[in-house]
Amino acid sequence: MKNVQSVCEQINYKKSSHYNLYQFNELGMTWCPVFKSGSTTWRNYFIDKFVLNPPREYVLNLLKPHQLLGSRKGRIQDLKQYFREEDEKNIRFTMVRHPFSRLVSHVKSSGRDHEMVNQRGLWIESAIVTGRTHLTANNADLFRFKSELNSYFVWLKNGKHGVFEDGSPENPFLNPPYPTLSELVNHIIKMRRSGRDWDGHWMPAHEFCNICVNKFQYIIRLEDEPLELWYLVDKLGLWKDRTLFLNRANNSTKKETEMGEVWEEIKKLKKEHVDFLSRHFDVDFKMFGYRRGQE
């Protein structure tokens, strides 16, 4: 945490206008969900605890009654922003992950059928079409290929009955029928330039959680499980529920393998993409002690 404070003192901090803290006063804690950093496990835990008769599909929006939506309490004191709905004694915590791992994980999960449908309008369709339009020969083909892509999304939404037969073999939007890492990076660049880079899947963690303003007591790196996670769960008074948070493989060999795969994906990117990501996540690299390169 000393490193976090040091970086906050050094940088020209870009304060986020988003409010991504969730208070659980009954448990004495406040949480920020950094996406693709173990947030699903915590989200599901809190939904099971606080949402009566939840639907089959768990989404973060179910916890909206617990979200601190800008109800700030006075000025920032001792580098900490207070909120009216939050017990001042709450322990604030979050979990972070290597920025490149977050992106690679997001691309992989986005290729799943239900995520393709859920995130179609958020970024997937736009990223695919923008990244591959140059591969179409004329406007007639562009119109036809986009129509086929729409049919593919409908097919996915309807449960993939039978074999998808409405796509042309030469349709670039269906080869592959999911977004690539480079297309995600291009989309992030586009959103960053337009000021609409609000998506928690690729926002730097320090911005998404307003790290330099909200003053967290605990920031755990996903890569440092299980020891740091055990420590956090104990400090939060959740030791009896510890098995719920340790239901994934935590051995060092698996982690090294995962990072090896991440670096292989990063190597496939253009230099300008890697340079952009290095700038985009610059503060996260410094704040949480992550390497920018494999060596």
Image: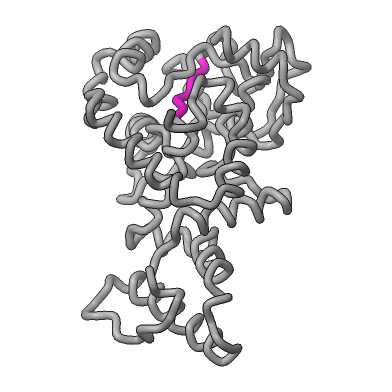
Q: Is residue 65 left or right of residue 106?
A: right
Q: Indicate the position of residue 152 as horizontal and vertical percent values.
A: 38, 76
Which quadrant would the N terminus be assigned to in this image?
Answer: top right
Residue 123 or residue 85, whichever sits in front: 123
Residue 144: image location, x then y, percent: 50, 88
- Number of numbered markers: 0
Instruction: Indicate yes or no whether the magenta region holds residue 95.
Output: yes
Q: Quadrant of the C terminus?
A: top left
Q: Is residue 124 visible?
A: yes
Q: x, y percentage for residue 265?
A: 40, 47
Residue drawn where x is 57% and y is 27% of the image: 284
Foreground residue among 151 and 277? 277
Quarter-wise, where is residue 209 in the image? top right
Residue drawn 68% across the image and 50% down it: 196
- Left of 54 or right of it: where is 91? right
Q: Position of residue 193 (x, y in %)?
A: 72, 51
Range of residues picked out in magenta: 92-97
Residue visible at 59% across and 15% down? Answer: 4
99 and 56: which is toward the camera: 99
Closer-to-camera residue (214/202) = 202
- 265 over 4 or under it: above or below: below
Residue 167 in sight here: no
Q: Is residue 35 magenta?
A: no
Main secondary-structure element of the magenta-colored stretch: strand
